[in-house]
Structures are given as C-alpha cells and as structure tokens.
Amino acid sequence: MTGLHALLAAVLAPGFLANGPVRTALIVGGGTGLVAAVVGVFTVMRGQSFAAHALGDVSSAGGSASYLLGVRPMLGFIGMAILAAAGMEWADIQDARERDLVTGVVLGAGMALTALFLYFDARSGSASGAAISILFGSMFTLPASIAVPALGAGAVAVVTIGALYRPLLVSSLSAELAAAQGTRVRLLGLAHALALALAVSLSAMTVGAILSPALLIGPAATALRLARRPGPAVALASLLGIAAVWGGILLAYDSYYWTPGHGWPVSFFIVFLIFLGYVAANMASGSRTAADVSRAEPHCSRCEQD
Amino acid sequence: MRPQHWRRCLISGLATLLAATAAGCSSRTATHDGVRAIGVENQYADVISQIAGPYAHVTAIEKSPSTDPHEYEASPAIAREIAGADLIVENGLGYDSWVDKIIAASPRPRRRVIEVRRVLGLPADTANPHLWYDPKTMPAVAKAVAAALAAIEPARRDYFIANERKLAASLAPWKRMLADFAQSHGRTPVAVTEPVANDMLEAAGCDILTPRGLQVAIMNGSDPSPQDVAAQQALLSGHRVKVLVYNRQVANPLTQSFLDLARKNGIPIVGVYEIMPTPGYDYQAWMRAETEALIRAVTLGVSTTTLESAGSRR
C-alpha cells in the first residue's frame, strides 16, 4: 500500500486531485473518453470515420452560435450535431465516393457557419477567446455543473449502443445480411447516427470540435487493431479512451511545472497520447498482414456463427 | 505576451490591400480645413480633442465599450480614414498593430504617428498593453500631441501648449484619489480577470493576487492552466480578496464563473473598460469613476458593473 502511495505521489503533482478544474475535467473528460470509444468502435466498423470528423466540424457551428443565444455550448454542439447526423442518415448515399464528396461539402458549409458565428461572437463582446475554446477545447474552464448533463447525454449514447448491440454489429459488417435477418437497417443507422452525434458533441466540448474525431476514432481504431472480437474491442477502446484523457489531463497539469509560461494545452496531450497509442498498436500488430487488419475480418468469423 | 489574435493576422493583410486602394484616391482629403487626427482608441482621440479644440477633426476607431478590442477587425472605411490622417495616436504593444500595416501601406509625407509605448519609453515586450490606466501616461501623451499639432499648425502653438497644461492639471483630482486611497488602505488584496486596470490598481496601492498566467490566458484567449484557475477560485471562495476587478469587454464562461463565485461569497465586483464608455465621459471623468467604483467596493462593499447608464456626468 505504501508502495502504491509513493508511486502515486511521484506521478501526481501536488494538489492534482484536490484541484477543482482538474476534478471536473477528470469526470467529464473520462466520461467522454468512454462514450466516444464505445460509439467509435461502431463508427470505425461502419466506415464512417470521415462522417464523424465532419460531424465534429459542423457541431462547432452550434457551439459558436450558443454564445450568441446565451445557452450552454454543450446544447449548441448537440443540437447542430444531431441535425447534421440526421441529415446524413436521411440523405442515405450508398456510393462511397459520392458520400465522401457530400460529407466534405457539408463539412465546409458547417465551418463557414462557424466562421460567421465566431465573427458575431467577437462583435457582441460576450465570447472572448471563443474561437480557441470551440475549435481546440479548453477543458479546465468547464463549469462543475456541466458534469451531470454531460454524463447524462453520454449515458443515452452508450445505452442506445448497448440496447442495439447485436443488430448494430451485424448491420455494421453487412447491411444485406442484417436486412435478410429482418433488421430495419435504416432505423438502426439513425440510432447509430444519434449516438454518434452525442459522442461527437461531448468530444467537441472537451477537446474541441477540430480535435473531436481523434477521441472518437483513435481509441476505437487502436482497439480494433489489437482485439480480434468486437466485445473485447469495445472494452479495450473504452480503457484506452479513458486512459488517454486522464493521462492527458495529468500531463497538462504537470506541464505547469516544466514548461515556460503556464503549461501546455490539455487537448494537445490527449490527442498526442491517442496518436502514440495508435502508432504503438500498429507496430505491435505489425506481424499480422495488412489485409487481415484493413478488412474487418476477425469480426466476420464471429457474425457468421450467429 | 502580446495580445495577438489569429484572425487579426488574416484581416490585416486584407486591410493593407484596402489601404493601398484608398491611398490612390486621397485627393479628396487635400481640400479640407484644419488637421485630420485619429486616436485609434477613443481615450486617445479624447485627449487629442482636448488639446486641439476646434482646430482638428478628430476620429476614434475603437469606440465600442461592449466588444473586445483585442478582436478588432478593420474595415475599408477605416483604412481610408487612416490613409488621409495628419496625426495618428496609437497605443502600440500589439494592441493595435493592424494600424501600422495600414499606415505603411499608405505613405503620406506630413503625417505624424505617435505610439504611446514609445512616448513612455517602455520596452517592446512590456506585458500589460493597457497603458492609459497609468496616471503618468496621458500627461506624456498630451505633451507629444501638443508638439505634433504645433508642428502641423505653428500659428496655434501657444493654444495647444495651454490646453496640454490644462489637461495635465485636470488629472490632479484623480491622482489625489489614488494616493489618498493607497495611504488609507495600503496593500488592499484584489483579484482581477485581466491586467486591464492593473496600473491604476497599483497606483491605488492594491496587491493583485490573481496569477499572472491566468490574466494573460484570459487576455489572449488561450487555454488557462488548472493551477491558475484553482488559485483564482481559492482567492474568491476563501475571502482572501476585497474586490474582484473584471474586464467588462472580455466576457466568456470562465470570467462569468469567477463573477458568480464572487457574488456567492459576497465579494464586491467592479467592471472596468478597455475603451472609454461614451457618451457621458471624458478621459479624466472615466478614470475618476472607475477609481470611485474601486473605493466604494473596498470601503462599502458595493459592486459597480456598468458606467454606461451614467448619462451626462462629467
């Protein structure tokens, strides 16, 4: 026990856990890491990484508008992300090239709206520094009161994914197979899109809209490299997501003591940890063939049993 | 440390382009009577007006007390005004660096540019750009403005010098308020959101306890460290400060959370401005009003969040 204490004391800078902004960041950020990872596994399997990225960018329009409307940024992020996610599902473009094209155009329009709203924010004088906070996150400025609504929104996303786990898995791997089994594929897609919108919004609120895909895709992609089955992949992705966020918060806190100025941005540390994890996982799984990894092969053997 | 803003960099490029266009059609301004002067911030415009009297047409560029001047963006009309001005007073220290680019893009042989930072002999890496809160600043600016006006209109030299002395003398009541307060309430502990009024607070003998890093992060809109945020929260919830002085023109969820925490703990708050609130104030009255608000907060526990409804008090 004393050994553990000594280890903790060595790693944790003085006052880490007693620090109010750190505690809020640990709770909201940890929850976000978990939710993003769980949803992210399905997003990666469905091949919707770019859509997730676009959702993050489009949600920033809602985040920047929230300052003008005088509501919480979280509400703005969620509102805009749900609108965009529902729109994407509704458009239901099957051709991958066409889908990428439309997603890219919508992404651009979302960022254009963000630019407009940030301009209005600067004019109205109620949102200094909004650009940095919306695009790149500012986790230590989250109010403590955000914890309950944020975890609530996260719970909705995780419960949605959990309730639809099996049909979602089947439809993620083969829409035709799911349809043959009598699954309502489009309704499933919509449910996934809503869970994705919530996860993206939480990520945008914590690490910023531009960086939100990293939190969503990174741990999931790393876990899918290492785990051979979806169940363990979800569990591993959750662990990795939480570890990256908490590790990033710890490093940002400690950087106060070893950087000139007053510490480096927490979003940088989190996303960089995720990146390092992905690179390490690739090196560890280097013995496997590329084809084995790029097609979601390991999971197919599983669903054929069903 | 300079209050740079990424968007400003984009805009200043555009502004330079616009100024170049504007300079091409400046013949319009050649026929006017009197001096065309610009105070980039309206407090400097006010000082020019007080010295030039009716003999100059004075324009202020940053004059809205409800937006963040650090996020200012120039328009084509303003680029044209700057191109045609005979006298420009700018703050310097990156606070209004976009002006320099427009000036450089539209050369004008007789134009005089006064950079307040240089007038005060401050180094270019001075951390706090809000120079006008220092009681020593405006007398020095007034002197430089009078000299520049006298060079442009030598016949009215005596008039400008007399006005400059009048302005310096009119600051005496404010300086007396600050000195008296410093003497009666030495080392009053205060918290701030930004270094806006720090020079005035120091002249009033206050001890600014907010971490420097937090002030700079809020001023520049960058990510604050959790240590600094927690330190500020502890100042307020631990009743270790007598007043929270906040920048009215820089509001975001973080500064709002400090205001809420101060209110919850019964700590009076005083809102200060980066740009002179108008109508109703000249520079002297503005500085006195903010000092009065500080004194009322410390001695009576009364908050003052706005000066704008004050009407026509002078």
Image (tube, rainbow, N blue to C red):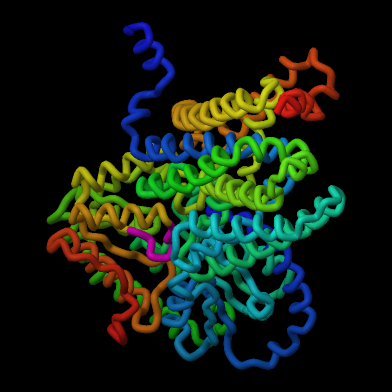
Q: Name above or below for residue A179 compared with residue B204.
A: above
Per the image, is B229 magenta? no
- Spot occupied by residue B193 in the image (x, y as percentages of width and height): 37, 53
- Spot occupied by residue B73 in the image (x, y as percentages of width and height): 61, 68
Measuring 29% from the left and 56% from the top, which residue is drawn there? Answer: B260
The answer to whether A94 appears left or right of A123 in the picture is: right
In front: A39, or B287? A39
Measuring 36% from the left and 45% from the top, which residue is drawn there? Answer: A144
Q: Quadrant of residue B142?
A: bottom left
Q: Name above or below for residue B116 compared with residue A249.
A: below
Q: Which region shows up in magenta? A: B246-252
Q: Quadrant of residue A284?
A: top right
Q: Quadrant of residue A103?
A: bottom right
Measuring 27% from the left and 52% from the top, which residue is drawn there? Answer: B261
- Spot occupied by residue B134 in the image (x, y as percentages of width and height): 36, 60
Residue A211 visible in rendering: yes
- Spot occupied by residue A205 in the image (x, y as percentages of width and height): 52, 48
Measuring 71% from the left and 23% from the top, which residue is drawn there? Answer: A225
For the C terminus of chain A, the quadrant is top right
In front: B133, or A254? A254
The answer to whether B234 appears left or right of B136 in the picture is: left
Residue B166 visible in rendering: no
